[in-house]
Amino acid sequence: MEGGCTCRQIRYRLVGTPLIVHACHCRWCQRETGTAHALNALYEADRVVHTAGEPELVWTPSASGKGQKIARCPTCRIAIWSNYPQAGPAVRFVRVGTMDDPDLCPPDIHIFTSSKQSWVTLPAGAKAVPEFYDIDQVWPAESLERRRLMRAKRQQT
């Protein structure tokens, strides 16, 4: 899968499938995106390969108080991906809307639905939680193994 910003200065290629795809309905994501929710595909940083340009990392406040780094195109300012403190720089939360074919990454889970807009109706059978979730209970086995490998790699450095 490939994607990039609106002006095409930033382009990227995603290697493999995402660890998981979140539709986050928290008020912070609503404010930041200016819409009902954020849609992020989580990838290991080394699986997000920049093929053109380099984004500018912008520190942005967050509800946790720990902030996040948002990678934005320095020209059109589109957010391409984020790093959140909990996951650190090893995981990039890629904005699905920046993918050339965003239909390939529907949400695996809707999070923070306790604050979703009342007019948003989730599809029948959609996995949804009022706040966050236990990763070990929700992520597929392959993603958990990739997470284990990321953590092992981080401990070696």
Image: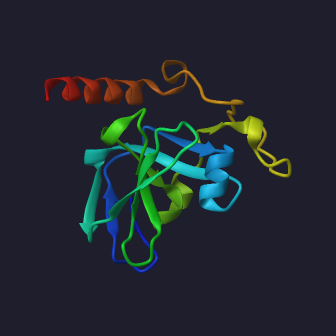
In the picture as drawn, the residue positioned furthest to the left comes out as 157
Toward which corner of the image does residue 129 lie, by quadrant? top right
User: What colour scheme governs how the chains and residues are painted in the rendered image of this protein?
Assistant: rainbow
Q: Nearer the viewer, residue 109 or 153?
A: 153
Q: Residue at x 54, y 19 (%)?
A: 137
Determine whether, in the image, residue 30 is placed left or right of residue 135: right
Quarter where residue 74 is shown: bottom left
Spot occupied by residue 42 in the image (x, y as percentages of width and height): 44, 43
Residue 56 position within the rendered picture, expressed as x and y whole percent measured from the top left: 33, 64
Count of labels shown? 0
Q: Nearer the viewer, residue 56 or 127?
A: 56
Quarter assignment of residue 141: top left
Image quarter hosting the C terminus: top left
Q: Position of residue 46 (x, y in %)?
A: 25, 46
Comparing 45 with 55, the one in front is: 55
Q: Residue at x 43, y 32 (%)?
A: 86
Left/right of residue 73 with respect to residue 154 in the rendered view: right
Q: Position of residue 62 (x, y in %)?
A: 54, 45
Q: Residue at x 81, y 47 (%)?
A: 121
Q: Quadrant of the N terminus?
A: bottom left
